[in-house]
Amino acid sequence: MWLSWLNGLLICAGLIVAIGAQNAFVLQQSLRRQHAWLVAGVCALCDWLLVGVGVLGLGILIAQQETLMEVARWAGAAFLAWQASLAFRRVFIGQALVAGGGGIQSWQAALAATLAVTLLNPQVYLETVVLLGAIGAVQPSPLGFFIGAAMASFGWFFGLAAAAGWLAPRLASPRVWRAIDLVIGLILAWVAWRLASGAMI
């Protein structure tokens, strides 16, 4: 179970801890102390539900079909390799995560904006339901993988909300993000190689 948990934790962390609209939105709301915990909770809960649907639902169906499993394996490896290449590219470009302006006042507006930024991105379904679902379903312990992935998501979003004041100036530094992207790239490249070689199947 521990190996499955670690796989879930590392893979989900590698996918989620990257510069993007969702992370910038959570940071923005946290810095302004506007519904930060609601925003973090909704982001984490959406990930938890989508990964659960993938690992404990769709992933099991994919795993039962040898052809679909092979397609998911190679497509997943290619997707992860592509994501790793983007992370390595960012190491040389040097980007930063900066909170945008214009915080949201009401909790209803914050909730709607969080759901939009999370669920209207097609890539989130590819990453959580299809990719994590296919990998998680064939782990020795799919439940362990799911728990690890959920912990990565909850830990990142709530950590971002709790430590926004301390993190903001550091996450605004391209140098810090070069180091983060290097780690992300290495993790994703390692997982892509293991997936392509059949070590995770």
Image (cartoon, rainbow, N blue to C red):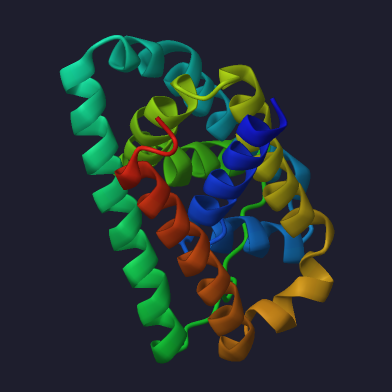
Asked which quadrant contains residue 41, the reply is: top right
In the rendered image, which quarter contains the N terminus? top right
Q: Nearer the viewer, residue 45 or 175?
A: 175
Q: Nearer the viewer, residue 2 or 27?
A: 2
Tell me if 138 is positioned left or right of 12 in this view.
left
User: What is the x, y in percent for residue 59?
Assistant: 38, 19
Q: How many marks?
A: 0
Residue at 46%, 62% in the rendered image? 20
Tell me if 130 is positioned left or right of 49 in this view.
left
User: What is the x, y in percent for residue 99?
Assistant: 59, 71
User: What is the x, y in percent for residue 127?
Assistant: 39, 40
User: What is the x, y in percent for residue 40?
Assistant: 68, 44
| Residue 101 seen in the current view | no
Asked which quadrant contains residue 132, the reply is: top left
Residue at 60%, 80% in the rendered image? 179
| Residue 30 seen in the current view | yes
Residue at 33%, 16% in the rendered image? 63
Asked which quadrant contains residue 122, the reply is: top left
Residue at 61%, 31% in the rendered image? 4
In the rendered image, which quarter contains the C terminus? top left
Q: Nearer the viewer, residue 162 or 75?
A: 75
